[in-house]
Image (cartoon, coloured by chain):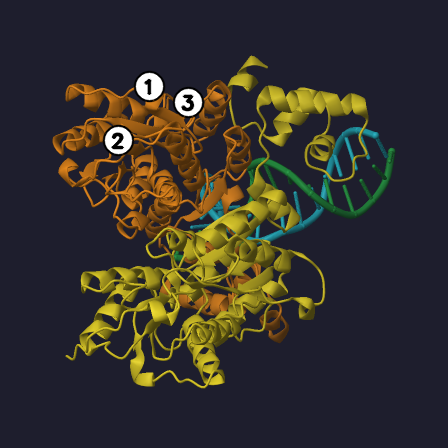
Chain colours: A orange, B yellow, C green, D cyan
Amino acid sequence: MDRETTRSGATLQDVAREAGVSLATASRVLNGSTRTVNDKYRRLVVDAAARLDYSPNLSAQATARGMTTTVALLVADIADPYFSSIADGVVSEADREGLIVQIAATGPEPARELELVRTLRGQRPRVMILAASRHSTHAAPALSDELASFEANGGRVAIVGGNELPFRTLPVDNAAGADALARALATLGYRRFAMIAGDEGLTTSDDRLRGFAAGLEGSGLTLDSERVVRSDFTRDGGYEGMRRLVEAGLDDIELVFAANDVMAVGALAALRDAGFEPGRDLAIAGFDDIPTVRDVTPALTTVRIPLDEVGRRALRLALDDFEPATTAAVPTAVVLRGSTPAISALTPRPPSGP
Amino acid sequence: MDRETTRSGATLQDVAREAGVSLATASRVLNGSTRTVNDKYRRLVVDAAARLDYSPNLSAQATARGMTTTVALLVADIADPYFSSIADGVVSEADREGLIVQIAATGPEPARELELVRTLRGQRPRVMILAASRHSTHAAPALSDELASFEANGGRVAIVGGNELPFRTLPVDNAAGADALARALATLGYRRFAMIAGDEGLTTSDDRLRGFAAGLEGSGLTLDSERVVRSDFTRDGGYEGMRRLVEAGLDDIELVFAANDVMAVGALAALRDAGFEPGRDLAIAGFDDIPTVRDVTPALTTVRIPLDEVGRRALRLALDDFEPATTAAVPTAVVLRGSTPAISALTPRPPSGP
DNA sequence: TTGTACGCGTTATCAC
DNA sequence: GTGATAACGCGTACAA
């Protein structure tokens, strides 16, 4: 016994032997669902397990049960607040379910998504959440096949944000949010807009662009396509986008809408570096409402997405049994802050040619 | 064959049968390390695998090999930029090694750390990285036992930041960084300080406090212990801390050092809400150099830790075989920004007693 | 209620 | 170089 105590990696066998019961009994009290075990034996087993410092081997459990207790989460960049907030929601909800979260990051190349899905599938996770999938993907068929195989084996798939893949999707109404933002800005008196968007094909960005343009049109305004610059979907991308706008001359622009908050924050910096004061010389708006935007100056107008709730709901969506049709879209809400004051507060800027 | 093609979850058996070879051969070509397989058979197997959409069951591999391909990462809060940046480093490095990262979050209660370590151990990860462990923990013995058991079974442990646990540790010299910061601030002309620290026992915070005080003393200054307020190690904690400082009257304080950047950002907001202008009425400094602090106004003086590198190095530390003694501490660097102008730029504030 | 025996999908040790 | 076959640690009929 002393030898057993010292040696680690006690197996269920060891526990059973130590407790003087059968393997099956030990299994039942330690991991079994139906509690049909005599209390006398139960105690014996529990004590033995504690004494041997037994830790169930989840891999073995998984192969035996044919089912794991992990959820795989695919993001583009875990350091991006958008994704880390979603991840936070997934992790906390998974925790409540006794599930462990595996995170993989595609990085800048969306092509890696397929590859990672393939790898993660090997883990046979109970659910797979795709939050990175923001591209109207040319690789869609292959990805779709992969996910279908996964589901055919009992796995659950949940996709965050609308794309056309035929799986449970948690819709985030980017278009409607951008539309509402445009109308709110129009109400504030803004008339001339520019936008810093992501690359074409990035559905999140495309939807927000489309919604924004629609909202403006609904207000009798237009978004000149020449005033839409494309850039990376990152802070530095936003910086670069604003730099280009400034270079092209923003003399007749009153407001720049960045396709997401990190871009907007970058745009803020670029604008300052160019000698302008955001919220006074030019208004800026973003999208997502990441925590940071409360703390930049001026505080950023944006469209709020409850990101942690998105994470939690994505997991629930995958886990629960119900009609997929009942899945309501995540509500978005326009949040007006200092970066978009009433137009009258904006100081007219002198024309600044290229 | 058609039936096989349609049915998913093809097993290695299926592939072997489809290819007309033995299980062993199939295993060798698909997953084996030593490539001692005839090319003719090799092709057969590879083709069959592709046709059946075979995906190796990592759980089964793990039970058979007694070793997984996952690394477990323990953080306090994945939505906190400090941790998500570290996680980013871990994930990217793990990716290079073909490893999958599992993330668990302890949340505000450090007691959960032990519990989570226990759970994660069940996964038999190849390495376990503790980044959350910032408390001089009363639960240290139990935690230490748990980790020791884990290592005794071939697992690797890496701990981020100094604590006294007897495992491979990636030292982050918080004390030295804070010391250097204090001296730099003294050089700028600052003389009267306050600090917003985390709860006592939070080693990260304690070390930074100690280092800061030491740096001041080295410059012939002192940090009055009455000027040290304790608060949550979060953005809102920083806000609350600054609120209390203001309430107590900060008439003779020139600079507030927050124990980390998110707190400093909160402090910035609180200061503004109280009617003061940070960087003009009062200087503020933080610690970590999270991405955000470049973009707040004024940009925040801080001590830079290369967080993604911390993540990468932590994984390497766990993975590599070498003398633990050779592990150099992560370099920190003082970064002076607008939130701590030369003291002459600070406007004298009128006394504001409670 | 408890124990026996088999199966989960792979790897690894043998002989061949 | 290849193929049986025994592990790996555990769940779970099935029988007792």
Amino acid at circle 2: Phe
Closest to the observer: B38 or B206?
B206
Screen quadrant of the N terminus of chain A: bottom right
State the CA–CA distance, disc 2 to disc 3.
35 Å
In this rendering, do the residues under marks 3 and 1 share a single chain?
A: yes
Position above or below: B68 against B158:
above
Residue A322 disc label: 2
Residue marked by disc 1: A225
Residue marked by disc 3: A200
Q: At x 71% / y 60%, what residue is drawn?
A: B321
Closest to the observer: A50 or A311?
A311
Where residue A118 sits, quadrant-wise, is: top right
Drawn side of residue B183 relative to residue B236, left or right: right
Position above or below: B96 against B179:
above
| Circle 3 SS class | loop
**Earlier residue among tags 3 and 1:** 3
Which of label 2 and label 3 is nearer to you? Answer: 3
Drawn side of residue B351 relative to residue B140, left or right: left
Q: At x 32% / y 50%, what residue is drawn?
A: A292
Asked if one can make out residue A28 in the rendered structure from this viewpoint, the answer is no
State the CA–CA distance, disc 2 to disc 1.
42 Å
